[in-house]
Amino acid sequence: MIKVEWRQEFEVGYERIDFEHRIFLGLICDASVALELGLDHQRILRHLEEIKHYALFHFISEENIMLDIDYPGLESQKNEHQILLAQLDDKIHQYRNEVMDLATIVEFLFEWFALHTTQADTRLGRYIRSSQSRAAFPFPPETLGLPLNESVNTG
C-alpha cells in the first residue's frame, strides 16, 4: 500500500477547494487500500471511474471559482486539468486491459495531486486571499455548521 495522507501543505486557504481536495485525496487513498485488499478487477475499475468523475467535478468547480474572481491563471489551470483527465483516462484504459497495475495508477494520482495542489492550487489560494473578489457561490453555509435559514437574506 502506498502511504497517502493529508498534509497541511495541501491546503490552499479557500475552504471549498480544501474540502474538495480532502475528498479527492480520500478517493486516492481508497484506491491504495483496494490494492492492499486485492479487490476484484471490476470493482477497482468502478472506483477508478469514480476518481475520474470526481476529478472532472472538482476541476469544473475550481474553474468556476477562477471565473468568478477573474483569475489570470485560469487557462493554464484548465490545460493542466485537461491533461490530467486525458492521462487518467489512458491509465484506466491500460488497467482495464491489464497492461498497467493499480499501484502505478495510485502513485501517479498521488504525485499529480501533491504537485498540482502545492504549486498551481497554492498560487490560486494566494490570489483568492489577496483579491477583493469573492466567488459567486461561496462555500455552502450548511457545511460550515450554520443553519440554512440564517444564511438566506429574505429582507
Image (cartoon, rainbow, N blue to C red):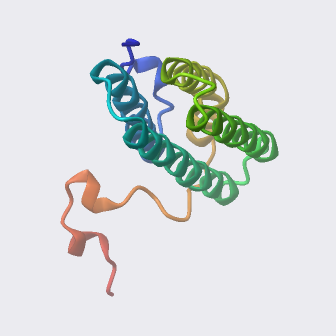
Q: What residue is drawn where x is 40% and y is 30%?
A: 31
Q: Quadrant of the C terminus?
A: bottom left
The residue lying toward the viewer, choosing from 75 and 71, is: 75
The residue lying toward the viewer, choosing from 108 and 141, is: 108
Q: Quadrant of the N terminus?
A: top left
Residue 3 visible from this viewpoint: yes
Looking at the image, is 114 positioned above or below residue 50? above
Q: What residue is drawn where x is 66% and y is 51%?
A: 66
Q: Quadrant of residue 87?
A: top right
Q: Tag count in the figure? A: 0
Q: What residue is drawn where x is 60% and y is 48%?
A: 59
Q: Residue furthest bottom?
A: 155
Left or right: residue 49 versus residue 44 is right
Left or right: residue 77 versus residue 17 is right
Residue 133 visible from this viewpoint: no
Q: What residue is drawn where x is 27% and y is 23%?
A: 37
- The location of residue 124, given as percent across then percent down, is 64, 37
Left or right: residue 9 versus residue 36 is right
- The location of residue 49, given as percent across then percent down, is 50, 47
Q: Quadrant of residue 117?
A: top right
The residue lying toward the viewer, choosing from 122 and 60, is: 60
- The location of residue 71, given as percent across then percent down, is 72, 47
